[in-house]
Amino acid sequence: MLNWDSEQIFLDGDQYFDDLVKAIDESSHSITVEMYIFNNDYLGKKIANHLITAAHRGVKIQVIVDGVGSYTFFDKFHDLFQKNGVAIKVYNPLPFVHPFFGELKFWRKIQAFLMRFIRLNKRDHRKIITIDEKIMFCGSFNITVEHTRQHHENPWKDMGVRVSGENVKFAVLNFKKIWRLRDYYRYKKQIKKLNLTAWKQNPLRLNNNPLMKRFFYKDLLKRIQKAQGKVWLTTPYFIPKRKLIRTIGLAAKRGVDVRLLISLRTDVLMFRTLQYFYYPYLIKKGVKVFLYTDSVLHAKNVIIDDWTTIGSSNLNHRSILHDLEFDLVVEDRKNVEEIENNFVQLSRDSKQVLKTNLEKRPFWDKLLGRLFFTFKYWF
């Protein structure tokens, strides 16, 4: 029995956002947006206008953006949303970007600065939008034009999914907790009556606290350890913990088809050097590493035998230890097959990293990789 009434996969940003806009326009009572990047570009303005239009007809709209990912949000959208009835919050805002920072007294400024500095490394990296507590859009798509052909004829490669059903209320409950709404516990009691799956078994995997982060990390390790046929991993930022590296290597050594699909082009330049740190070990164990070169590969996807997820989690320290992330377990077999076929096609369009490629790396690049690796905890 599937957990969703419907499940639709998107491998194209234009189709994803067209469907999202249509759902916003058809909304009747509530919309929540939890977004790492909400940019002031063509797409950001388009989504903002449709949200405002929905607010004008009485839809309750709440938006959470990240203080680093959307650091220009207050300059561009804060006043516009406030004037038009869209409630907004910024997750861990940067002190000098927050619009009310200048109004605080001196010691309150110091207190605010210290608190935000302590939490500086904790970000909300999710991309989740719910419509009327019945429909959810999620994946690796930020609200930024790089994911669409408005930016380039060959936009970033991403994955998204639209699902519908009662389990969307679980995502709304999570949003209320991040927002810290007073009705969180009342709402929690309401959805308990629906007998929704507990968080450990829920198809929407959320890492709200250290306990949940540890559970889902260990669950990923166990699934790789038990894999019989394949472990195919798509990630733009590959700086995982050592135990995950060893687990991937051991799976390949015992004959599992292990493939890594990583982006050569990246919006974080140091990753191109840093990611090479693990390649010699993995290739020696039998892992096939592919670098996608056509555009920025931004999708986050795990395929382990017949178990598949799409989400916001990267295979790096940030996602495993620090950031708020999510992953959604894809249940429809047709969608799983479509994702697997997409992985195969992207691999064919990529450049495989061989041992000879690694031997040709200049000495300074290897040294720089070692230096960056010292600070892996922050990436």
Image: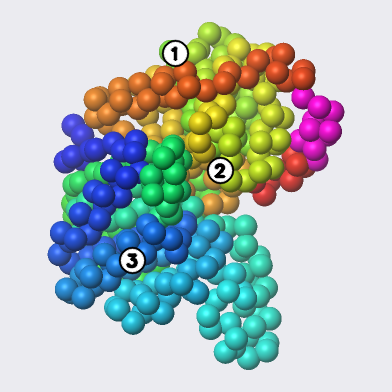
- Of residue 151 and residue 81, the one placed in the foreground of this image is 151
| Chain-order first, disc 3 or disc 1 | 3
| Segment colored magenta | 361-371
Q: How far apart are marks 2 and 1 (CA)?
A: 24 Å
| Residue 195 in view here | no
Q: Residue at x 70, y 36 (%)?
A: 274
Structural crowding at the residue carrying mark 2, measured as other residues with C-alpha within 10 Å and reported as few (<14), some (14–19) or many (≥20): many
Q: Which secondary structure, mark 2?
A: helix
Q: Main secondary structure of the magenta part?
A: helix
Quick one: label 3, few (<14), some, or many (20+) residues within 10 Å? some
Could you give the CA–CA distance between mark 3 and mark 1, rounded to whole angstroms? 46 Å
- Up/down of 54 relative to 201, above or below: below
Q: What residue type is labelled 2?
A: Ile
Where does residue 299 sit, x and y in percent of width and height? 45, 37
* 91 magenta-colored: no
User: Label for residue 320?
Assistant: 2
From the viewer's perspective, is 81 left or right of 278? Answer: left
Residue 48 — which label? 3
Taking the image as shown, residue 172 lies to the left or right of residue 377, namely: left
Q: Mark 1 points at which residue?
A: 228
Instruction: Identify which amino acid the numbered label 1 is placed on.
Output: Gln
**What label does residue 334 carry, if any?**
none
